[in-house]
Amino acid sequence: ALIRGFALLLPTYPDARLLLVGKGELRARLDALVHDLGLARQVLFTGYRDTDLPAVLDALDVFVLLGAGSDESCRAALEAMAAGRPVVARRVGALGEAVVHGTTGILFDDDRPDSVMAALRTLLEDPDRSRAMGEAGRRRALTTFTPEHHAAQVEAVYRSSLSRTLSPARR
């Protein structure tokens, strides 16, 4: 859906480029699709990035993630948010909780190319809105998805469980 959605965007934004970051068994199929659609000059496969990921994220205008990732944590989306990039994502797994639709990015419910294209177009047509979403995403990532915040949530669950277990009414 991403590559086909990107192709739908090109008549309006002929200078747009799509950077596909990551590795996996889909690479050969995606590469074939790119060539079948005549997008070899517009789509770049970077492979897995680790040490230079901040520089890669800095080069993006918009970050797109259509699945929550192999561990369902949507870590890649959180990294993009922390880097100040608006996120376009399919509402699956943890993505629906991490990305706030209309505030930190755009969520959609299906995997149709026109949904991807519409979300990308919305952000490309309004750079100020895109920038504001990126800034809101950064704030959200750096306050809500930190190890300290997670530890506080886990501690609250433990305290709640302990207080119910030790309450006088249960004795």
Image (cartoon, rainbow, N blue to C red):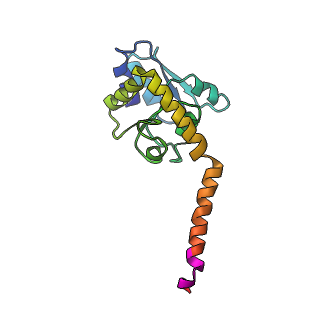
Question: Is 163 placed left or right of 18 in the picture?
Answer: right
- Percent from the top left, x then y, of residue 31? 45, 25
Is residue 23 among what the camera can see? no
The residue lying at 47 percent from left, 36 percent from top is 104
Q: Nearer the viewer, residue 137 or 108?
A: 137
- Tell me the quarter of the image containing the C terminus: bottom right
- Percent from the top left, x then y, of residue 159? 61, 68
Residue 10 against residue 80 in the figure, above or below = above
The residue lying at 42 percent from left, 21 percent from top is 124
Residue 82 falls in image quadrant: top right
Across the whole image, how many numbered discs are drawn on residues?
0
Q: Nearer the viewer, residue 18 or 143?
A: 143
Q: Which of 155 and 19 is in front in this view?
A: 155
The residue lying at 59 percent from left, 44 percent from top is 143
Residue 162 falls in image quadrant: bottom right
Is residue 29 among what the camera can see? yes
Please, what is the dominant secondary structure of the magenta stretch?
helix
Residue 47 falls in image quadrant: top right
Residue 149 against residue 29 in the figure, above or below = below
| Span of residues in magenta | 164-170
- Tell me, yes or no, whether the highlighted magenta stretch contains residue 107: no
The residue lying at 44 percent from left, 28 percent from top is 30
Residue 78 against residue 29 in the figure, above or below = below
- Percent from the top left, x then y, of residue 139? 57, 38
Residue lying furthest bottom:
171
- Percent from the top left, x then y, of residue 99? 47, 41
